[in-house]
């Protein structure tokens, strides 16, 4: 089984020179791990969630190479990410079943409709928790996110507590 810390190190190297993005995926991973544990995910689903949370933005680099810095949308990340992730995960010895699901999650982590399972929901919530902070969004946006995006009891409560909203 691929070790999570080996993947973290590979992602740090991959995103080398971009400390902001490295901090982003580490924060998303931390929150996803916590929410998954609080929601009592089965071990295999928890592992898949953690792998996906570390690699969810891997498509930014190839997107920038194709479209330019500052022009990479969420959709471009979704399009470009799975191929790069598959290469990295294969090199680290990731289980093919886990890799398939992770690539699906990377390819959909900015798509908030038709969320098909708890790993997907938690990834979206963890990424949103971090993005709300990093983008400096006002409390009104946080309240809207709680109403529209958050579904897990743990993620919802963390968001309410983190941003002091009801």
Image: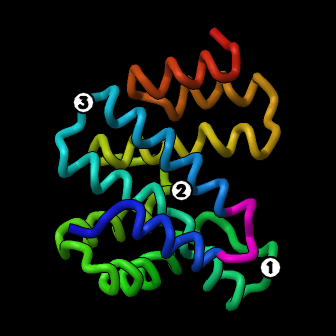
- Magenta segment: 16-21
Q: Residue reaching furthest bottom?
A: 66
Number of the front mark, 1 or 2 = 1
Task: Kindly indicate the quadrant of the structure image that contains residue 5.
Answer: bottom left
Residue, far top: 166
**Which residue corresponds to the image point at 32% horizontal and 46% vertical from the top-left?**
119
The N terminus - image quarter = bottom left
Residue matched to label 2? 110
Q: Earlier in the sequence, mark 1 or mark 2?
A: 1
Which residue is disc 1 drawn over?
A: 69
Quadrant showing the C terminus = top right
Label 1 crowding class (10 Å Cα cut-off): few <14, some 14-19, many 20+? few
Task: Give the distance between the C-alpha atoms of the residues marked 3 and 2, in whole angstroms.
Answer: 24 Å
Residue 40: mark in rendering: 3
Left or right of 41? Residue 4 is right
Locate residue 53 relative to residue 102 in the image: left or right: right
- Location of residue 35 with respect to 123 vertically, above or below: above
| Disc nearer the start of the sequence (3/2) | 3
């Amino acid at each position: 089984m691929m070790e999570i810390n080996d993947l973290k190190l590979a992602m740090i190297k991959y995103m080398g020179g971009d400390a902001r993005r490295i901090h982003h995926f580490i924060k998303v991973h931390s929150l996803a791990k916590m929410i998954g544990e609080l929601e009592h995910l089965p071990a295999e689903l928890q592992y898949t969630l953690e792998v996906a949370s570390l690699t969810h933005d891997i498509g930014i680099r190839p997107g920038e190479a194709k479209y330019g810095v500052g022009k990479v949308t969420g959709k471009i990340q979704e399009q470009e990410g799975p191929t790069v992730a598959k290469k990295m995960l294969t090199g680290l010895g990731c289980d093919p079943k886990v890799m398939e699901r992770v690539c699906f999650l990377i390819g959909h982590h900015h798509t908030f409709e038709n969320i098909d399972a708890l790993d997907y929901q938690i990834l979206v919530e963890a990424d949103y928790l971090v993005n709300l902070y990093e983008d400096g969004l006002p409390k009104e946006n946080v309240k809207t996110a709680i109403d529209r995006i958050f579904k897990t009891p743990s993620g919802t409560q963390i968001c309410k507590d983190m941003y002091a909203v009801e």
